[in-house]
Image (cartoon, rainbow, N blue to C red):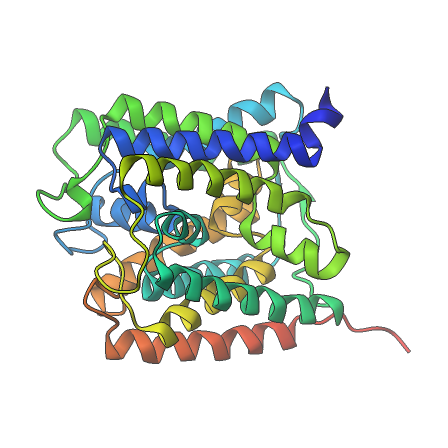
Amino acid sequence: MKETLNSKKGLLVWGGLLGAVAVWLAIMGNPGNMAFCIACFIRDIAGAAKLHTAPIVQYMRPEIAGLIAGAFIISMATGEYRSTAGSSPMIRFLLGIITMIGALVFLGCPLRMVIRMAAGDLNAYMGLIGFVLGVGTGCIFLKKGFSLGRSFDTKKENGYIIPAIFLSLLVLSIVTPLFAASTEGPGSLHAPILVSLAAGLIFGAAAQKARACFAGGIRDVILMKNFDLLSVIAGLFGVMLVYNLVSGNFKPGFEGQPIAHAETLWNILGTYTVGFAAVLAGGCPLRQLILAGQGSSDAAVNVLGMLVGAALCHNFGLASSGTGTTPAGRIMCIVCIAVLFAVAASCMRRTKK
């Protein structure tokens, strides 16, 4: 049974389930081409916690707490939970910040990129070019010996903290008025809380079992000619494509795409940054949340970096909007790429002579 689930057909089914969950969220109220976006949802959570004050992107997204909890529960149930820590935490934190800056220049994580592609957004296909190039650049450094070092086993309770934090924030947002909530814009568009939480739980469990990682799928093709993880992405894309065609939401083109801009160069460079950072960190934003849920404190530090990065993007005018990028965002995107090359070059294994 396990071999069947891990086969290409099995992974395609897992991807289809992820796509079905995204469709469910879109139908229930999430923005159609942002049905499930790790970067966008973490940005909204940062806004809800008042780490930034952009009024249209503030909402404590239950999907993120659900996703982490889903990965935690399924990994505990299957014996895959393992609490580890200790592998270059500050570099991983920095990579989380850089990942978020690149994602918000593009306006979406790799998950949303695929969802946008399935809706006909040609800007997302430009983003795919940048993402593949970024992952490819990271693979060059992996081949040359890049490493952030090994992680070590820690007390199992260490891995409980991130799931507990996000679930606690969600509960507090429901029972207290402490958190901000958008009344207009993307932050005001959301499915009912219980639907969002259930969808997050299912998505997290399925992504954990499928080892879903958008950067990992491309990395495996480049380094090992292994297409298995791409099956997950293909399944998700296929289900979303069918939904968009049936619902009339498939609108091919560059202009007029919802919550997107048509600046091709910066769509490419934004996702290049995300792809490069994801390979160095050991996984895309979705994968980092899943790993954090199954006990990795290294991934948890990366997630916290993304949360801080989201705040920085909106507090300092780095995030793009539907009308385009900002001068500060363009400058920081280039700076982030330079920093990624510096990190990659400085973390090469040194062989003893």
Please state which of residues 189 and 115 is positioned toward the viewer in this rendering. Answer: 115
Residue 133 placement, left or right of 78: left
Residue 244 placement, left or right of 192: right
Please state which of residues 116 and 310 is positioned toward the viewer in this rendering. Answer: 116
Q: Residue at x 62, y 67 (%)?
A: 136
Q: Residue at x 18, y 67 (%)?
A: 323
* Residue farthest to the left, as pictured: 183
Name the spot of residue 337 as percent of width and height, x first.
48, 75
Name the spot of residue 237 as percent of width and height, x first.
47, 43
- Quadrant of the image containing the N terminus: top right
The quarter of the displayed image where residue 167 is located = top left
Q: Is residue 57 visible?
A: yes
Q: Residue at x 54, y 50 (%)?
A: 214
Say above or below: 3 vs 270: above
* Residue farthest to the right, as pictured: 353
Say above or below: 212 vs 343: above
Name the spot of residue 198 as percent of width and height, x first.
37, 23
The quarter of the displayed image where residue 201 is located = top left
- Quadrant of the image containing the C terminus: bottom right
Residue 2 placement, left or right of 49: right
Please state which of residues 270 and 69 is positioned toward the viewer in this rendering. Answer: 270
